[in-house]
Amino acid sequence: MKGILDEFKAFILQGNVVMLAVAVIIGAAFTDIVTNVSEAIIMPLIAAIGGQPDFNGIGFTINGSFFNIGLLINAIINFLIIAAIVFFLIVKPMNMLLEKTKKEAPVDSSVTPCPYCFTMVSAEATRCPACTSELTPAKA
């Protein structure tokens, strides 16, 4: 029984489980922010332009069944708003930050790819250690 508890403890304390838990918590908090931006700023802006802030009442009836197309329209608009907010406020700035900090790896002239298996081989090698092909100075 102690072995199972130790294994469970190791599983719970793994970095990826803890990071996933943190991501869920941050995601829930961020969802609240995005929802409020959508409802407080974007939807009233759409209402000012289009005249109707909420599309829930839009639909049609067939044989007594009401098809509420407005719910789908609201869901699509909310998805697009959330996707735009995430892209412009998180993804785009993060990509710009990563681009600024990205350094190109120095070119190592002491190794070259094997022309047969493309394993990186010392430039001075006469035989590939991976595929054992003979290397000549012209091919290495």
Image: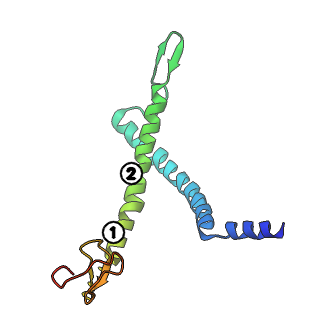
Location of residue 118 in the rendering, given as x and y in whole percent from the top left corner: 29, 73
Give the class, few, some or many, for how many residues have Cα within 10 Å of label 1's Cα (few <14, many ≥20): few
User: Up-down: is 27 above or below 94?
Assistant: above
Q: Which mark is residue 96?
A: 1
For the image, the number of numbered tags is 2
Amino acid under label 1? Met
Residue at the (37%, 58%) spot, across then down: 88
Q: Work out whether residue 100 or residue 129 is closer to the camera in this orientation and state it.
A: 129
Q: Circle 2 — which element?
A: helix
Residue at the (26%, 72%) spot, across then down: 116
Amino acid under label 2? Ala
Location of residue 87 in the rendering, given as x and y in whole percent from the top left corner: 38, 56
Q: Which residue is mark 2?
A: 84
- Looking at the rendering, in which quadrant would you find the C terminus? bottom left
User: Up-down: is 22 above or below 124?
Assistant: above
Q: Work out whether residue 6 or residue 94 is closer to the camera in this orientation and state it.
A: 6
Location of residue 20 in the rendering, given as x and y in whole percent from the top left corner: 59, 62
Residue at the (83%, 70%) spot, across then down: 2
